[in-house]
Amino acid sequence: MIRTVESSSHVSAPVLAAYSYCESVTGQQARNFAYGIRLLPTPKRRAMSALYAFSRRVDDIGDGALASEVKQARLEDTRALLARVRARSVAEDDTDPVAVALSHTAERFPIPLGGLDELIDGVLMDVRGETYETWDDLKVYCRCVAGAIGRLSLGVFGTEPGARGAERAPEYADTLGLALQLTNILRDVREDAEGGRTYLPADDLAKFGCSAGFKGPQPPPDSDFAGLVHFEVRRARALFAEGYRLLPMLDRRSGACVAAMAGIYRRLLDRIEREPEAVLRGRVSLPGREKAYVAVRGLSGLDARHVSRRTVRRRA
């Protein structure tokens, strides 16, 4: 069983300011993520914001316009900062608010900080321009940049006492991260191509005649682009189905947070499935009112109850 450790003791002004900074970063740069974590109690919401702010810093280095060798050096500097957090050598009056907030989070929740090392490893793959021949190859990358975040988040959420199968909770959290990342890859396929990156497996691209890539609003000539998208959508749906088995293991508000974030991405997947070529014309997104509906559905426990009933039927 994974338990969270939430202290009711006073949080100092410097730490509160650090968390406030992280929550501001989260609200400005991760609307889908921010939508989900607002359903959490304050200590967990702050902790998730600290994790996001650190992860955002790593991603921004990888996505920036600096030379490859400079990016690698900065990523290793960030890894050194993580080592300071792990060693609990970050003071409350440190000038880096992300380090202060993350250090406080690591002291109060059993988060596996090695997951942030994995994130840095994944972004280094981006910096090196790695491509992926097979789905198994791409899974390695997805586990670094998204599966690890799922496992880190589970350290904040914890599992309910007596939850059946809770020993597999990290596995399900990891799988849900893969589902979210594959959805991201589909949504951003043109944007990534314009940045010189290709994530979809080369085997899949060749199978559907899309090896030429995606650099315009139209699919490659003579390709089955819709077939490619539908193939990847089915893969993502299978990952969601497996990852959703985590929900009945979480407390109500943590489950609502996960259901809201995952629900938004599942609806994005629905839109992509209905109109595959939309991802070549621009970023597919959901209106605020639809996100609000997903959040309410998550808070009501509908998704968790649905998964729980389905799991019982399978065991029967």
Image: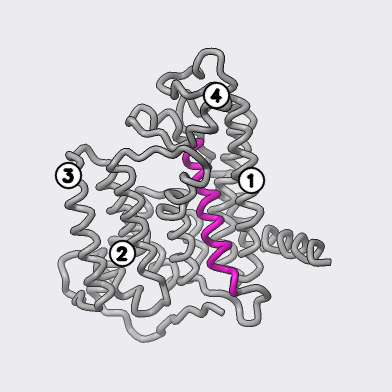
Q: CA distance from mark 2 to mark 4?
A: 40 Å
Q: Residue at x 39, y 63 (%)?
A: 115
Q: Residue at x 52, y 51 (%)?
A: 178
Between marks 2 and 1 in the image, the one whose residue lies nearer the viewer: 1
The secondary element bearing badge 4 is classed as helix
Is the residue under label 4 in contact with that under label 1 (CB below 8 Å)?
A: no
Residue 86 appears in the rendering? yes
Image quadrant holding the N terminus, namely bottom right
Q: Is residue 56 magenta?
A: no
Disc count in the image? 4
Of the residues shown, which amino acid type is indicated by label 2?
Answer: Ser
Residue 34 appears in the rendering? no
Marks 2 and 4, the one that precedes in the sequence: 2
The quadrant where residue 230 appears: top right
Residue 277 marker: 4
Q: Residue at x 24, y 77 (%)?
A: 87
Residue 24 relative to residue 203: left or right: left
Q: CA distance from mark 3 to mark 4?
A: 36 Å
Residue 69 marker: 3
Q: CA distance from mark 1 to mark 4?
A: 19 Å
Q: CA distance from mark 2 to mark 3?
A: 32 Å
Marks 1 and 4, the one that precedes in the sequence: 1
Residue pointed to by mark 2? 20
